[in-house]
Structures are given as structure tokens and as C-alpha cells.
Amino acid sequence: MPFKHFLGYARNSDGTPRLVESEARIVRQIYAMCMDGQTPSGIAAALTKQGVLSPSGLTQWSPSTVKSILTNEKYKGDALLQKSFTIDFLNKKMKPNEGEVPSYYVKNSHPAIVTEELFDMVQHELLRRKESGRKHRGDTCFSGKIVCGDCGGVYGSKVWHSTSKYRRVIWQCNCKFKNATPCAT
């Protein structure tokens, strides 16, 4: 398994990966935060605020780094070989494999950090968010999950009486006042 900065793993003397438990805890935390409704941006901000170093040793986390951790099969102990290949050996130019050369999927090739079930649940959740066609904010565990039975819009939290003693948070369809024919809920 070729890797340079792979959070949760280090190389043995023979080049095989071994688990680094202190980093593996961070990976498990990232998966848990995703399942709690956090977005990659929110997770990156939280890790930066906690002072956790990124896989490349930076103090600032990027959402793309978090997303790559959430979508990489290596964290469940599997390996997809030949994700990319060299198209020009002289210039060492690489290209993502889009079926030009065979790729191989190896199950249980190294110690897993997250269970296969958790990995699959995260993939399903990321796909659900993408296919919803809406921006997922991840403020609460209910964000993007309560759908209006009348118009199909998503419910969001709203604050009533924000400056009085009667202040309270309610959940209401986000399309209630947006369209020419408002939602009837």
C-alpha cells in the first residue's frame, strides 16, 4: 500500500502499514462526527479548533482532506489497487484510472480503523446528502432530514421572539413563505 501521509497508519520496516492508535482515534472521531450530521467543512473547522494536526502536519484542516478520509476504503481495511496509473514514464505523469487499465479490490489487506458497517453507513449518508439536491448545513442531527409532507421541502430551525423572554426554537418548512403559493403546513 503506497502512502505518504496516511492518518492512522505508519510504515513497518518492510513497508506494510501498521496502526497508530493515537491517529486512529482522530479518524474514528471524523466518522462519528459525520454520522452525527456534521459536514466535512464543519468537521475540518472543529479539528482545526481542537489543534489536531492534519495528515500532512498542518494546523489548518481542509474539507477536502476530511472528505478523502471519509471516502477512502483503506480505513475499513481494504485496498483498491491502480486507482491511477502512469501515462508518461519519462515525465512521470499520472492519470486517474477510468477503466483504461484493470483495477483490483483487496479485502482485509491491512488492519481496519473503522468497521465496514460504519464505513458503508457514512458512504450512504454522503450519497443521501448529495442526491437530496439541497445544501446540507449540519447544524443539528435533524438538519436536512425532516421533509415536509405537503411540498417536499426540508424543515429548518427558526427562532421565535428572539429578543424577548418568550424566545423559543421551532422547526418549520423552509418553503413556508418562499413560493407564490406558500406551503400549507
Image: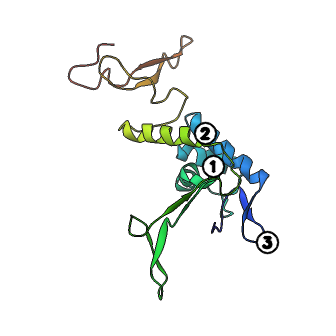
Answer few, some or many: residues within 10 Å of disc 1's Cα (few below 14, many 20 plus, some between 14 and 19). Answer: many
Which residue extends farthest left? 180
Q: Amino acid at mark 2?
A: Leu
Q: Mark on residue 5?
A: none
Q: Position of residue 3 (x, y in %)?
A: 64, 67
Q: Earlier in the sequence, mark 3 or mark 2?
A: 3
Q: CA distance from mark 3 to mark 2?
A: 30 Å
Residue where numbered disc 2 is placed: 118
Q: Amino acid at mark 3?
A: Ser
Q: Earlier in the sequence, mark 3 or mark 1?
A: 3
Tags 3 and 2 in contact by the CB under 8 Å rule?
A: no
Q: Earlier in the sequence, mark 1 or mark 2?
A: 1
Answer few, some or many: residues within 10 Å of disc 3's Cα (few below 14, many 20 plus, some between 14 and 19). Answer: few
Q: Is residue 93 left or right of residue 79?
A: left
Q: CA distance from mark 3 to mark 1?
A: 22 Å
The residue lying at 52 percent from left, 55 percent from top is 64
Q: Position of residue 21 (x, y in %)?
A: 78, 51
Q: Amino acid at mark 1?
A: Lys
Q: Is residue 181 left or right of residue 123?
A: left
Q: Position of residue 71 (x, y in %)?
A: 53, 50
Q: Mark on residue 13?
A: 3
Q: Secondary structure at mark 2?
A: helix
Q: Is residue 42 left or right of residue 10?
A: left
Count of numbered badges drawn on the protein: 3
Tags 1 and 2 in contact by the CB under 8 Å rule?
A: yes
Residue where numbered disc 1 is placed: 76
